[in-house]
Image (tube, rainbow, N blue to C red):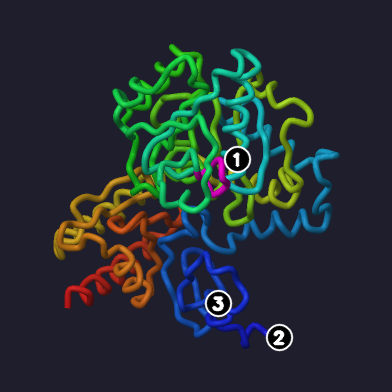
């Protein structure tokens, strides 16, 4: 069977129906442009949901993958490997972290973080200190544990009973946390910028308050930076933007630039609770993934790249605001860096997917974050010309919907 015989209809014949992919099938990408089977070209403002941080087929990432592919692909964690150690050293050097655990996804990184938080509390305070406080509308992954910590009941429906000891407060409302936190709390888990929950940035004072509450109650502060990390906010990690240092940080998505990898970062003292045999991953720390991620971090951590994210953010915001004002599309454009959300106005409420579909038909790929937010998470190095053209195509889509 050749690629030419593959159709979208075949997806429904062979795949579990938990996804509803678009009708077109992309077959090639370069930079911030994507082409489908029919040769139609798209400007990519979606970035694979904040994953392709350096665009498609970045020469440095392709080179890193090819180079490692000729050496060694897999060992399992019965042995270590050079790319994994090198990447862990880099992450520790560039962040608060002193120890790293590698996984394959954001969900796995969060699973490890939540298990570490509970085990650390169990070792140091006893079995009563096991409660996790998270936030409504948060998203932390699709395992049973992470979807239970996430504050969106729709993702848990039909999978109960859920793991216990999880309580949900209101994001950006410190008083709601104060009502829940106690000597039983082992961790507070938060996204510095809620992604799936509507691209809602954390208030600086709220995040600082969480740090203080955790210190007061001997609880760990866990930052889920799966979506906000690796340069997305114009800083390597969002905690550096806010000036609030967590005890545990999770990262994935952009970390591999499209190659599956996740990581949990923490301090040496906390890491001791995951002693030999307490947790693991067959593929975690895979040499191919770590070699690619190393190149991603080497590029993204450059000051000029991070500065460029902040500059591009302004260009996007200005363009989206202009379109929003012209067509009464958005009440506000919010987010940090190149994780942006256009909040639909009352006139457009509930039509985010309709906007996404129309945009694709005009040749620009965007995302949604719920029914009322159009989300953008493009390459961190997207050329200005692609931003301009993509915004022009987006305006055409909105104009056509207006009729």
Q: Position of residue 91 (x, y in %)?
A: 61, 34
**Magenta stretch bounds:** 141-147
Q: Nearer the viewer, residue 249 or 254?
A: 249
Q: Is residue 287 shown left or right of residue 129?
A: right
The residue singled out by tag 1 in the image is 109
Please give the name of the residue rendered at 18% of the width and 52% of the height, measured from the top-left corner.
331
Camera-near label (3 vs 2) is: 3
227 relative to 385, above or below: above
Residue sitting at 60 percent across and 39 percent down? 111
Q: Nearer the viewer, residue 383 or 105?
A: 105
> On the rendered image, what quadrant is the C terminus found in?
bottom left
Whether residue 246 is visible to the viewer of this picture, yes or no, is no
Q: Earlier in the sequence, mark 1 or mark 3?
A: 3
| Residue marked by disc 2 | 1
Quick check: is 208 in the magenta stretch? no
| Residue for badge 3 | 12
Crowding at dot 3, Cα within 10 Å, few <14 / some 14-19 / many 20+, comes out as few
């Amino acid at each position: 069977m050749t690629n030419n015989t593959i159709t979208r209809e075949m997806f429904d014949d062979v795949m579990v129906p938990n996804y509803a992919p678009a009708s077109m099938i992309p077959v090639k990408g370069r930079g911030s442009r994507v082409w489908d089977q029919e040769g139609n070209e798209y400007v990519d403002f979606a970035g694979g949901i904040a994953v392709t941080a350096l665009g498609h087929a970045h020469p440095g990432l392709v080179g890193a993958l090819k180079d490692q592919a000729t050496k060694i692909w897999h060992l399992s964690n019965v042995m270590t490997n050079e790319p994994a150690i090198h990447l862990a050293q880099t992450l520790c050097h560039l962040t608060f972290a002193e120890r790293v655990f590698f996984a394959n996804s954001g969900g796995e990184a969060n699973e490890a973080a939540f298990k570490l938080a509970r085990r650390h509390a169990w070792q140091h305070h006893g079995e009563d200190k096991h409660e996790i406080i998270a936030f409504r509308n948060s998203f932390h992954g699709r395992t049973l544990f992470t979807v239970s910590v996430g504050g969106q009941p729709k993702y848990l429906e039909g999978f109960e009973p859920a793991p216990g000891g999880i309580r949900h407060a209101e994001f950006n409302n410190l008083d709601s946390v104060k009502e829940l936190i106690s000597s039983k709390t082992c961790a507070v888990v938060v996204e510095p910028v809620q992604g799936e929950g509507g691209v809602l940035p954390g208030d600086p004072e709220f995040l600082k308050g969480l740090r203080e509450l955790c210190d007061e109650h001997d609880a760990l502060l866990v930052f889920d930076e799966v979506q906000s990390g690796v340069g997305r906010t114009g800083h390597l990690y969002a905690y550096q933007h806010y000036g609030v240092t967590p005890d545990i940080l999770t990262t994935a998505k952009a970390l591999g630039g499209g190659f599956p990898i996740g990581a949990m970062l923490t301090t040496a003292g906390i890491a001791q609770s995951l002693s030999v045999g307490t947790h693991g991953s067959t593929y975690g720390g895979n040499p191919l993934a770590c070699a690619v991620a190393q190149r991603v971090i080497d590029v993204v951590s450059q000051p000029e790249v991070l500065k460029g994210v902040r500059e591009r953010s302004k260009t996007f915001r200005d363009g989206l605001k202009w379109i929003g004002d012209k067509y009464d599309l958005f009440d506000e454009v919010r987010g940090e860096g190149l994780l942006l959300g256009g909040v639909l106005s009352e006139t457009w409420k509930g039509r985010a997917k309709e906007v996404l579909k129309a945009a694709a038909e005009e040749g620009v790929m965007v995302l949604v974050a719920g029914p009322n937010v159009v989300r953008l998470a493009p390459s961190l190095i997207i050329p200005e010309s692609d931003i301009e053209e993509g915004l022009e195509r987006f305006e055409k889509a909105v104009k056509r919907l207006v009729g």
